[in-house]
Each structure stands twice: as structure tokens, then as C-alpha cells.
Amino acid sequence: MDRVLMQALEAAPAEAQHPALPPPSPLEMPVQSLKGEPRRETGLIPPTRGLALRRALVIGGAVVMTAIGGRQMYLVLNGAGQSFLGWAVLVLYVVLFAWIALAFTSALGGLIDMLARRRRGDDEALPALSMRTALLMPCYNEHPARIAAGLQSIYESLEATGRLDHFDFFILSDTTDPDVWIAEEASFLALRERTGGAARIFYRRRAKNTERKAGNIADWVRRFGGAYPFMLILDADSVMEGGTIVRMAAMMEREPGTGLIQTLPVIVNGTTLFARMQQFAGRIYGPLIAHGIARWHGTEGNYWGHNAIIRTRAFAEQAGLPILPGRAPFGGHVLSHDFVEAALIRRGGWAVHMVADLPGSFEEGPPSLTDVAVRDRRWCQGNIQHAAVLPTRGLHWVSRLHLMMGIGSYVTSPLWLIFLLFGVLISLQARFVRPDYFGDGPSLFPNWPKVDPVLAEQLFTATMTVLLAPKIMAYVALLFDGRLRRACGGGIRAFGGVLVETLIGGLIAPIAMLIQSSAVVGVLLGRDSGWNAQKRDDGRVPVGAVIAGYWQYTVFGLILAGAAYAVSTPLFLWMTPVLVGLGLAVPLVLLTSSRSAGRALRRVGLLRTPEEAAPPPSLQRALALYRQLGEAKEEDAMRRLIRDPALRRHHLDSLPPPRQRGQGAIDANLVVGCAKLADADDFETAWASLSRAERSAVLGSREGMELALGLARAA
């Protein structure tokens, strides 16, 4: 070991620090039974005027549209007679059209709401607060600089409101990488020093990340939830304006029957073409969708897992998640916990609201289609798990609808694929299979197969109109919002952005359809998705990796093109958007993952958003801090602890007491790691021989740390 590290190791311990955690304030959080009668609060939710009518118009309108569309498809498929393929295509069309019809009617309600409602002003006086809120940032193997930058930006923004005394901050780590873990601790101490917030910024790491993010939050509730009436859940890439947080806390104080308020996070900081398309779509279409669902969801809203404030007591009493029966991927811990937690909170008699017009809530999106595929694989498994939650006793029917729509968001992809393939098979059947004019029974007249091409074209046009109408509505809403229109570069540039996003998004859609279809098949075959940290920065993927990952989509597109061309040229032309997207899968993924392409469109003013053109102060501050803090070099965990006495003291003080005989299970990684250290003469060689899991176990144990530090001193 070099002399500098030896001197640091022999240095006197640092002076006493503020504790890493506040005094415990336990709050009971029982695991809920999905079959038993729930404990329910009564009289908390006041009646909402006109909610039943709004729901009838949205859902009833979708039903009427679906009935009309189904009738027209039945007439189009008259030529298929009573064949299995004909009925299968009809049923699939009805199911899929119902999906887009509901999106249409909901968006229409959102347009009405946006045009009629006065925009919430950013300059309205901030309300006074009387209760405490904990801001919780769960993290899992994330870059510590990102976490610190976001939290410091939020801290400073809250400090500027004059309401900081009502808020505490918790970094809740489930990190398994030992180097990231110690870097998190160093970042936490530095954050306290930069902000002067040692009395209100805390850090806790779990040695065992049981139940993943849901278990992370539940652990905090059971240990500290009694001291905080509200908790605001952040994600590792979340940034929120202080004024927004104060207003959310004030809403919870004014509405004692509200259990959860979800904001609409705006996607920001995208640099690749794919990320900029996502943030443009989210910024332009997102408010329309959010206003639409808020209009008919009412007090039965949903929860998206972050940038939301929750009443701690309601969460503790109602949202303790059970372990689903069976093995993963269908059973086990609930992956997509947010939908289920919202449903259980509402089941307990608390309102769940979406606040669509509250600005100042931000997040980041995946930089490439490949990264979306990785994330969606986990979400797909979690949403399909919801099938086991649907029969839960006492759920509100709207909550069940949320769960079904979550399942449908992934199941519709294989349904679209089957619908497409069956359509081709019907065309092949019509061309190569001789029709049966008289059937099996007696008939005076032949059954002449006839497909009305004009009716088919009209139905296709109507379906595409319904599918694309929400984008048109969102653009109309933009035209009526002068501030948003100017921030997007004007009406013409905004329309150009809509065209670019629609065109490229349409080409990517069949690739995404196959990706989600394979994810659904993987879940049905029993493959567990695992839990991986999300990639948030650079979207570049090596060309070889893109070819290896997407060549099969190109091959499938070529096969489909051959089958369509064998039937007829009109069918081939009709399927061209799907065929082109699949055939160009590799170059499309490379193009959309490119920062250069994203910057090129930004230079000409396309896909521009207000937050990109003029970032709010909190975003500017978070980005500047991330660039500054991200310049620090990565360092081995033990070398960092040896070099930094203050960090070493904090780390040792935060370790749990030694395991007593017969207390809990023996940690095999700790046993092996300690044995390797005890048997070694050279620290560097011994530490290098430990696996990542063994290093984490040693770092998390007083016994292991004594062995490691003792060996380092003897070097």
C-alpha cells in the first residue's frame, strides 16, 4: 500500500458528525390480504359533481365507437364467410379498436378540460405549511453525482421558498455495487457540507434489497414514517421545483381525505434523437392525456411511482404489499408496485388524484430504443403480475380498470402482431384456397365471397384517424396556449415536430411491437426479468450490438413483405409502413440513438420543448451540479475509505452491530470474504481476490472491516 494511504489510515479519527439517520419513529405497516375484507376509512372522500357523467361519456363513447367499428369490420370480412380466420380477425379488431377508442374519448375530454381551465400560475403566492414532509429518493446502483445534483437542486429551491423547515431528505439506497455504495456515502457527506443541511439530509442503505423499491419505501415507513405526515417519492433522475413541492404539501393539508397526489412529470435533458422525440411527445401530448384521465378518473386516480406525494398513514395502513403466490415471473414480490399501491390506498377509502396542471415536476427518459426494451421487459412482467391482483376484494372498479389497462399496454402488442398475421393469412386464403359456394347445408343460392375494397379503405382511414386524433388535439391545444406555442418555436415548427415524431415513431412502432411481444412471450414462458439499473445518459450502442440485436426484425420484415407481395400489390403497399420499419430496424435504431441527429434537429428548431429552450432554474442548477460532480474519478471502495478518515468514521458508525450466534442466516459471502482476508498476508492481493458480493459483505460488517483495515495497516 502506498505511503499516502498509510498516513491517512493512521490519521486521527474525525470529529463527531451529525448522525446519518434521525431518531426512529416506527409506524406499523401490515401486509394486506387480497382476499380478506379491507380496513376502510369512511366519509373521507367528498362527492365529485359530474364525475359519473364524464365517465359515462368517455367509456360509453368508446363502447359506441367500438360497436360501429366492429360492425364495419364484419361487413368488410364478409368475404371470409364463417371461417376461423375471419372471426379471429373480427374479435381482435374489436379488442384493439376499443383500446384506441378509449384513448380517443379520454383525449377529447382532456382537450375540453385544457381549453376551459385557467392555467395554474407559477407566480401565485405560496401557501403556509404546518406539517412535515419527507422527500425520499430510492436508488439502486445509480451514479451518486446524479442523486446529489438532483437533491441539492431541490434543497436549494425549497430553501428559496422559505418553507425548508417543513422538509427532510432521505437517500434510500439499495445499491449492491460496493464501489458505488461507498461513493454514495462520500457524496452524501459532501452534499451535507455544501448545503449546510446536516440536520435534515439523511442516508440509509439496506444490506438486503428485499422486495426492491417497494420494500425500500416500506422499510423507511416502518422505521421513520411516524414522524412525517407526508412523504414525497422521487426517482433517481427526478427534479422538482420548490414551489411545486410546497403546493403539493399544502393540498394534502387542505384535503384530509386525499391519500396520494400524482403530478405529471415532464421528460427533460434528452440529447439523442430518441430521447428528444420522447420529451417532445411527453411535453406536447402528455398534458392532453393527463387532463383527460384526471377528468374521468376523479378520486380514483393512479400512481406512477415517483414525483408524487403520499399521506404516510394511508400508505402504511393500506399499501403493505403481499407476496403473490407462485414463482416468478407470475408470483413473488410485486414488481410494478405503484398501480397496486394506488388501488389499495383507494380501497381503504382514501382519494387518489392526478394533478395535471401543476408545473415544475421533471424526470429523464431512456436515451435509446434498446434501453426502453430493457426497462419494458421488467415493466411487462410487473404489469402481467397484476392479473393476480385483479380479483382483490374491495377494489374500486376504476382501480381494476387501471390494472387491466396496465396489462393491456403490453398484451396489445402481441394482439396487433397476431391481427396483422391473420390479415395476411386471410388474404392468402382468398387468393389460393377455392371458396365453398354452397357450404354443408341445403341452400337455394350460392354464398358469393365478396370483399368491398371501398369499405375496407374507409375503415382503415377511420381507424388511423382515431389513432392519430389525440396528437391533432394536442396540437390544437398548443395553438391556443400562446406561451407554449412560442416556447416550441411557433406553430409551424411545432407542427414540423409533430410530423417528425409521428413519422419516425410510426416506423419504430412495428419494432417496438415485436420487442414487447417477445417480452410477453418471455414472461409467459417463465423467464424472470431480474432488476437492473437504468441507463440514463448516453444512448450510443455499438454498431455490432445493434446488428446482433435487431437483424431478426429485418428478416421477419422481409418474410412478411414476401408474403404480402405474393398475395397482391395493393396488400404490399397497404403494409408498407410496417414493412419499411422492420426492414430498416438496424439503421433506425442507430439513427435514433444518435446525439448528432438529435442536435441537428435541435439546430433547425424541431422537437423543441419549453424546458429545452429555457430550462427552469432547478433544472439548470441540477445539470450544472451533475457536470461538476460527475468529473470526480471512480475509486475502489476500500481505498476511498482508507484515504478519507471522515468517510471511514461515518461508514463504521453506520454499520449494524455484529451478528450474534443463532441470530438470522449466516452470510456465506461474508464468511468467504473474511476467510480470504484472514488467510492473506498482502492486503492488495487479498482485496483483489474478493468478488463483488464478498466485498459488499465485508464492507457491511464490523468484523469484515476490522479484518480489512487491520490487514491494510500491516501492509
Image (cartoon, rainbow, N blue to C red):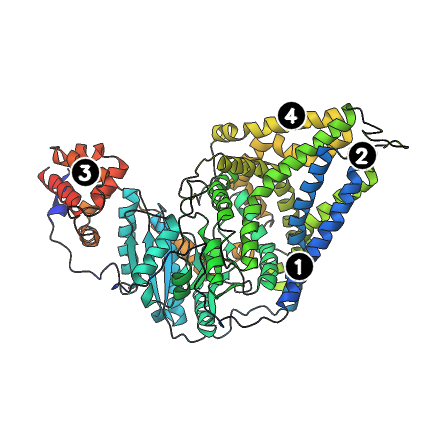
Please tell me whether residue 597 is drawn above or below residue 360 in the rendered image: above
Q: Residue at x 44, y 39 (%)?
A: 529
For marks 3 and 2, give the CA distance: 72 Å
Q: Secondary structure at mark 3?
A: helix
The answer to whether mark 4 and mark 2 are in CB contact below 8 A is: no
First in residue order: circle 4 vs circle 2 = 2
Closer to us: 84 or 684: 84
Q: Residue at x 30, y 46 (%)?
A: 208
For marks 4 and 1, give the CA distance: 40 Å
Instruction: Identify which amino acid the numbered label 2 is placed on.
Output: Gly
Name the residue that disc number 3 marks: 671
Name the residue that disc number 4 marks: 559
Q: Could you classify mark 4 by the number of other residues whose Cα lies within 10 Å: few (under 14), some (14-19), or many (20 or more)?
A: some
Residue 496 visible at all: no
First in residue order: circle 3 vs circle 2 = 2
In this view, which residue lies farthest toward the front? Answer: 442
For marks 4 and 2, give the CA distance: 25 Å
* Residue 369, horizontal then vertical, whole percent: 52, 40
* Residue 69, horizontal then vertical, whole percent: 74, 47
For marks 3 and 4, give the CA distance: 56 Å
Q: Secondary structure at mark 1?
A: helix
